Image: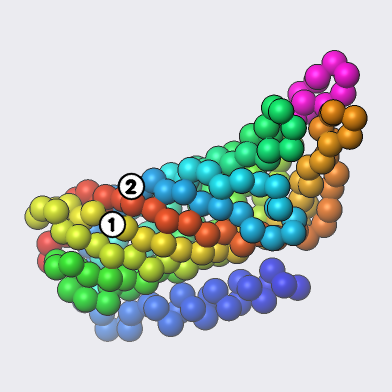
Amino acid sequence: MRTSAALALFTLFALALLPSPGAAQVRFDGLDISGGYWGWEGQDFTDVEAGPRLGVAPLLRIGEFWNVGVEAVYATAEVQLVAIPIDIKETGVNGIVRRYLADPNDVHAYVQARGGWSRLESDIAEGLEGQVLSYEQSGLALGAELGVGFPAGRYIDVLWAGGFGWNSYTQCEVFGQSGGYRYIQFGDDCSAIRWGVRVGIVLGRSDG
């Protein structure tokens, strides 16, 4: 239920950002490549530490002040419960809508909404013999971002942005330890608040 409500709210937010049907031509507006540092919050992810996040998104310009695109994401995190941490890898795909608040050919601010799919993977050593078990889970990822762009050349932008998000998974990994060994339990319908900052560069940006 809460996943459906969040998706509905995100849809309304994204529609509010979209330009009117009478907008100008659509054209390629560069490749957004970024690296950042993102954290996890929430009772289901208490022991998950922040880690690096990479993103790549081809962008289309719609009219003068709009971008839409598709973002591929790769991120890592750790669970520091025992001497040997549990590594978590996140991959995902998001649709994004970006609205420039000033002329994008000058220094400008923008707001952005995103929504898509997130997948978490981890390898966990269990038992006396240290056998490795792999666990995977997928879910919904929603988010918003506020950023500033600095034109660094005719076809290049440098970006700095901060954002937050909400991830929801139908089955959740909950980590613990007992007798010096790691174990895993499963819970239903877990979620996390995501937060972070990123710096990036847009290559091939339209100068129109």
**Residue at left offset 53%, top offset 44%:** 51
Instruction: Check the image and report above or below for 96 versus 201.
Output: below
**Residue at left offset 85%, top offset 44%:** 185
- Residue 184, position as x, y percentages in the image: 83, 39
Residue 178 tag number:
none
- Residue 3, position as x, y percentages in the image: 69, 69
Residue 134 lies in quadrant: top right
Q: Which residue is mark 2?
A: 33
Q: Can residue 62 be spotted in the picture?
A: no
Magenta-colored span: 123-133
Q: How many marks?
A: 2
Residue 135 lies in quadrant: top right
123 vs 174, left or right, is left
- Residue 128, position as x, y percentages in the image: 88, 19
**Residue at left offset 84%, top offset 36%:** 177
Name which residue type carries label 1. Leu
30 vs 187, left or right, is left
In the structure shown, which secondary structural element does the residue marked by tag 2 occupy?
strand
